[in-house]
Amino acid sequence: MRDRPSNLGSSMPLRSAFAESLLARASLRLPLLSLALLAACATNPVVRRATVISDADKAAKAALANENKLDVGKIPARTLAVTPFTVAARDTILRPLGFGMADLLANDLAKSPEIRLVERTQTEAILRELSLVDEGITDPREAPRVGRLIGARRLLIGDASMQPGNTVRLSARVVDVIAGTVQDLVHADAPLDRIIDAEKALALLLFERLGITLTPAQRLSIEQRQSTQLTALVAYGRGVQAEAKGDAAGSIAAFEEASRLDAAFSAARTQATAAPSASSSRSSSAASNVARVVDLAAQGVNAPVSVKLPEAVDAPVASSSLLSLIFIIRVLP
């Protein structure tokens, strides 16, 4: 029987060529994978929020380092910062509500162009630096310093407390940072499960005390209840509280929970999917830059594009981002 001719010699070059092809494809995919991971990070809500918190902390440290050089005369007259409502009792429900109601109150006050609200992230960063997140501002004499560091002409401080009959009271006063004067205390009461009514009533009282006349459209917008579900409002408050403590992942998780508990809670949905408004344009710009790098690399273009890498954070990548990465690895030639 004839021996079959060996194909060993001819198969070796083929195998070698195949191996080289695999290596070439891998060398293309690795940079693309890195860029795709970068894109996933740039669009991940937890990473974006962590970046905003980090930036705010750096600004707060700089403000404290240069506190003696701050020129209070340059603080715009219409600026106002709202601090979380303090809660005397260690109430597991009322404490997060103190954070959530203060944030929703700030949103309502911002609906008048006569008030320029300082971003919550800036206020929270200063409170973290001064170790006032848990304690809050209980003494109006502390407020001027906080206001100067934040860059607010007026600072709204207040508290939330339980009253007889399972009623909650929201109280607030406004401190003039430069003059040091304190406007009269105002308060609004409502049953605990209708605490949002107290927030709305307090907002309207504050506009009245500040001498601001609302248009019918502005008043109607302020009177709209974001949510009437107490569990959703508590979850929202936990999100604000977590962010105030610098916990980006915990913040997003709580906002997502609030959104699940009340699908109509638009403020919770917005907070769960986006970083605070102060950084939204910067985040979108970073994401678009990364997307451009990925596109150019996929086309084989080696073009220099300036991309600022986000700071490393211990945060999970969304499942949708991981699916995108798997798609890139499997489909790209």
Image (cartoon, rainbow, N blue to C red):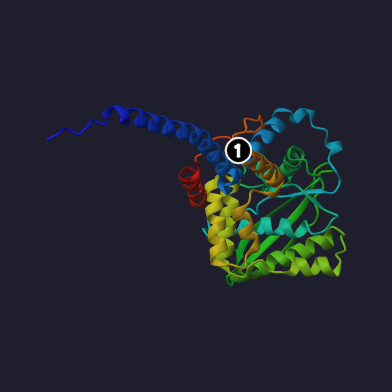
Give 45 or 88, whichever is nearer the viewer: 45
User: Where is residue 152, by image quadrant?
Assistant: top right
Residue at the limit of the structure toward the front, as seen here = 2
Q: Nearer the viewer, residue 137 or 253?
A: 253
99 to 4, vertically: above or below: below
| 224 to the left or right of 4 | right
Residue 87 visible within the image = no
Return the residue at label 1.
299
Q: Image point 60% across, 42% down: which residue?
A: 42
Q: State the image coordinates of residue 264 (x, y, percent, origin top left).
A: 62, 68
- What is the crowding at mark 1: few (fewer than 14 residues within 10 Å), some, or many (at least 20)? few
> Which residue lies at the image location 29% right of the left edge and 27% below the top edge?
9
Q: Position of residue 138 (x, y in %)?
A: 67, 49
Q: Residue at point 82% right, 58% down?
A: 112
Check disc 1 and give the amino acid type. Gln
Q: Relative to residue 303, is residue 211 drawn left or right? A: right
Outermost residue on the left side: it is: 1
Residue situated in front as seen by the camera: 18 or 4? 4
Q: Position of residue 36 (x, y in %)?
A: 54, 41
Q: Residue at 68%, 59% (x, y): give it.
A: 104
Q: For residue 50, which quarter of the picture?
A: top right
Residue 38 visible: yes
Left or right: 233 in relation to 64: left
